[in-house]
Image: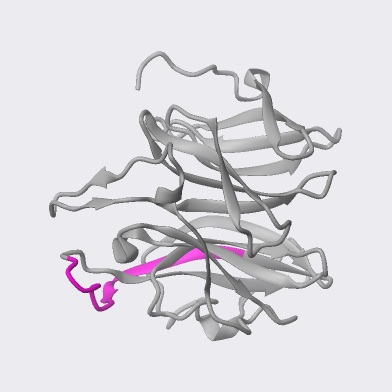
């Protein structure tokens, strides 16, 4: 709505049902609203964060919650927030702390109240450089950064808590998987490696109408195509069964 701080477009919408209502999570930004640079950094971070809007129906209308402010403090440049409900029924906000501010991007979590407002401080889950496949990205300023994108949590039929997340590897964007050793959002988180490579990432797991477990990813960036994969719940992880080319009508293109 008019008058909100965010005027620079929107990324990564997700809709989650919580206590009988529908909550839309979307990342907004405002490049003109600068934040103080980190010590020693030549990058100028700006306001970016995931806002929540709520409606009684999927059809809307959705109205902004939390007075139009991000879930985490506005001083933190964050993105790609998602909702996780733990085994005790408590909600958590899981998100990426942007490399533009942090240099080494992280995945973090904040406990939420029933109104989906933060009731605790951000907790570090892991850093991008914890994954041995992740590669730092050289920047024009002369430094190297590590990217974290797109967390989504998924509990297998055996009770294992997994997380999808993305960064950059040897061949572009990577859709990767991590696993919580404790079975809780607090971790510690083990890096299980890539699920899909070749400019593929920011994926989400979902169930098809026939019950199949599916993964949708961005792939590739150069042509902005969504790609679909049939998945297997292997108990302690999820695995790719095949690319569902009959759904997207195109296998991986021969040019980049």
Does the magenta segment cover residue 28?
A: yes
181 vs 76, left or right, is right
Residue ID at (38%, 51%):
147
Classify the position of the C terminus by image quarter.
Answer: top left
Instruction: Give the image quarter of residue 86.
Output: bottom right
Residue 105 in percent (x, y) is at 39, 58
Specify the quadrant of the image occupied by residue 119: bottom right
In this rendering, position of residue 174 left or right of residue 87: left
- Residue 46 picture quarter: bottom left
Q: Which residue lies furthest to the top in this view?
A: 254
Nearest the viewer among 217 and 119 is 119
Q: Where is residue 114 in the image (x, y as percent from the top left)?
A: 75, 81
Residue 122 x %, y %: 52, 75
* Span of residues in magenta: 25-41
Residue 91 seen in the current view: yes
The residue under the point 40% across, 49% down is: 129
Tell me which residue sits at (40%, 30%) in the image: 223
- 216 part of magenta stretch: no
In the visual, does 126 lie left or right of 222? Answer: right
Instruction: Between residue 54 and residue 233, name the one nearer to us.
Output: 233
């Amino acid at each position: 709505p008019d008058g909100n701080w965010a005027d620079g477009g929107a990324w990564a919408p997700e809709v989650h049902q919580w206590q009988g209502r529908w909550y839309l999570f979307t990342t907004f930004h405002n490049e003109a609203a600068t934040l103080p640079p980190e010590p020693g950094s030549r990058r100028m971070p700006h306001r970016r964060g995931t806002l929540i809007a709520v409606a009684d129906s999927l059809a809307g209308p959705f109205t902004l919650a939390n007075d139009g402010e991000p879930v985490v403090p506005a001083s933190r440049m964050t993105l790609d927030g998602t909702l996780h409900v733990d085994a005790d029924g408590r909600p958590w906000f899981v998100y990426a702390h942007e490399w533009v501010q942090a240099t080494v991007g992280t995945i973090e979590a904040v406990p939420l109240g029933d109104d989906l407002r933060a009731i605790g401080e951000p907790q570090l889950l892991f850093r991008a450089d914890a994954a041995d496949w992740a590669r730092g990205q050289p920047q024009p300023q002369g430094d190297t950064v590590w990217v974290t994108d797109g967390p989504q949590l998924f509990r297998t039929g055996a009770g294992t808590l997994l997380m999808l997340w993305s960064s950059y590897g040897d061949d572009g964007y990577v859709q990767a998987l991590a696993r919580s050793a404790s079975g809780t959002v607090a971790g510690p988180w083990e890096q299980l490696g890539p699920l899909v490579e070749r400019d593929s990432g920011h994926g989400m797991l979902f169930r098809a109408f026939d019950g199949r477990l599916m993964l949708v990813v961005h792939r590739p960036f150069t042509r902005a195509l969504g790609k679909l994969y049939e998945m297997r719940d292997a108990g302690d992880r999820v695995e790719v069964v095949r690319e569902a080319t009959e759904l997207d009508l195109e296998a991986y293109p021969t040019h980049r």
